[in-house]
Image (cartoon, rainbow, N blue to C red):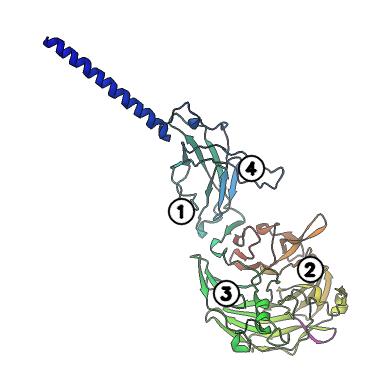
Amino acid sequence: MKHKFISTRRTVLMAGLLLIGSIFTLGSCKKLFNNDDELPCNGAEMKLPEIPEGTLFTQPIDPNITNPVIEEIITLYPGETLSANYKGVGAGGLERDLSAMKVRWNFEHDNLLINPETGAYYQKEEIEQMPSFQYNFSKGFTTNIPDDQIQKGDIMTSFQAVITNKCGETNPITAHVRIINSGNVMQPLNELSGIARTGHIQAFHNNKLYLLFGSGGTENYSYDITTRELTPLPAIDFSQYGFDMNNPNSNDKKGLERSLYSGTQWYNPFTTYARDGAKVYFAMPREATGRDDVLWEYDLETLQLSKLASVDRNVYDATAPANPAIWNLKSAGKMTLWDNRIYYFPLYKDLGEAYIGVFDLNTKQWSDEDIRVPTDDLVPAIIYQGNPNFEARSYFQLFYALDNQLKLVFEGNREVTYDLSTKALTVKNSDYKHVDMEKRATGGFVLNGAYYFLANENLGGIVQDNAFVLYKKNTDGSVEIADFIGGGNRSDGRQFTPVGNTVFVVGTNSVRYNAVRYWLE
């Protein structure tokens, strides 16, 4: 009886254990289907996406391009932010709920590509939860190469994305990335992107780039090119010189804001300025008369504005003056600096008498020996908006000094040269591509014995309104495209500032990069 009782107890115990096991199994099954991590391998939620072996990430594809060229290597410049996309944009992707899975990212280098959202380097391996309905599977990244390491050679790297579940993993999607770090290198200046604008004055001094006279002198900044720190500067006060700035409806305030920067891109760029050391000189007429306050000085060290000796001049109303500092109002001409003298064109004494004004920076006075430019003889007069242009001013485009010569460029590629040594004035047809006032081409700059200038791009015989190309005018007269900024959309108002073997370019927000630095070969 005792053995029989024990046997019965064992039977009951085993039955109890089986019951508990059944309950546990049922509970586990319930947990299995309630927890994504425990979904069955043969369930739809755990079915791996069908990704062909050898699949590559590519750069984002513009949906407006019918037949895009797909590159196997993703290229970017130091500081540029880009992404590696699977099946481009919108079309394709993974297109199903993969939230039950994870993705393992494997990076070839852990000190090269940066997560633009966190600012930290991607590590050798990172695991993330897959989001629901990943229509565009991608990974964003940027780089941060020190300035002293730029142009040290292109850098190649790669990374992979492997989607995993509890049962296995897919073939990886691979991204091959080249960082362009040789030749003409472009570096986006993200710190300036919020203030990049049209029509400003731009200068470099003591390791800082200055962006001045925004919104009537109220928006001014310095940018340390080493630390890449942007610092707001005090407003520039014109009221001490008789400008009525307190009344928002005053002609003085409106004219000043339009002359300097109105807040939109519709006003032509401010090209009438020059820098000598810590001093910036610019010409700006008063809207009320259009005759006085021609020349001003701004000290980059003391941040003080001074009015210099003015010179009387005749001006034209409406849109006749070329490249007006005040669009549709009185306007300033253009200036260039050579041998401690500012040369300013055009000044007028009588109808048909155009002169290059000379301002001596030592004496701070205008010279009586102005250089006469007989525009009617040198450059044939044209008809501009129904009015005879006796002064040829409406199609005067570029003005620069190089090798002791002053160069004035008129529409139609007429180049007037004044030799400061021989005092000879000559004219010839030259090559400055298509420089057209109507298309708002901007000025240029001298660098390493050559003149760089913007000209409107000509596509299929049609001059483009907002597409500009930067050209290089060599000393032998030949012209070539400047490789570091060739082609593309170049909205009016961009300013160029050479610094060593680099060029800082700051412009409007209507282009892909509104503030960049170019390293030249």
Does dot 1 land on a helix, a strand or a loop? loop
Mark 2 surroundings within 10 Å by alpha-carbon count, few (fewer than 14), some (14 through 19), many (20 or more): few
Percent from the top left, x then y, of residue 45? Answer: 49, 32
> What residue is shown with label 1?
118
**Residue drawn at x 43%, y 35% as measured from the top left:** 36
| Relative horizontal placement of residue 409, taking residue 97 as reference (left or right) | right
Nearest to the eye among marks 4 and 3: give it.
3
User: Residues under labels 1 and 4: Cα distance?
Assistant: 28 Å
Please say if 118 is above or below 302.
above
> What residue is shown with label 4?
71
User: Residues under labels 2 and 1: Cα distance?
Assistant: 45 Å
User: In the displayed image of the protein, which residue is found farthest to the left?
Assistant: 2
Nearest to the eye among marks 1 and 4: give it.
1
N-terminal label among 1 and 4? 4
Percent from the top left, x then y, of residue 473? Answer: 73, 65
Mark 4 surroundings within 10 Å by alpha-carbon count, few (fewer than 14), some (14 through 19), many (20 or more): few
Does dot 4 land on a helix, a strand or a loop? loop
| Stretch of the chain drawn in magenta | 345-352
User: Which three-letter amino acid code belongs to the residue tagged 1?
Assistant: Thr
The label shown at residue 438 is 2
N-terminal label among 3 and 1? 1
Any part of residue 29 in sight = yes
User: Residues under labels 3 and 1: Cα distance?
Assistant: 30 Å
Count of numbered badges drawn on the protein: 4
Please say if 200 is above or below 49.
below
N-terminal label among 3 and 2? 3
User: Residues under labels 3 and 2: Cα distance?
Assistant: 28 Å
Q: Quadrant of residue 488?
A: bottom right
N-terminal label among 2 and 4? 4
> What residue is shown with label 3?
219
Verify CB contact (< 8 Å) between mark 1 and mark 4: no
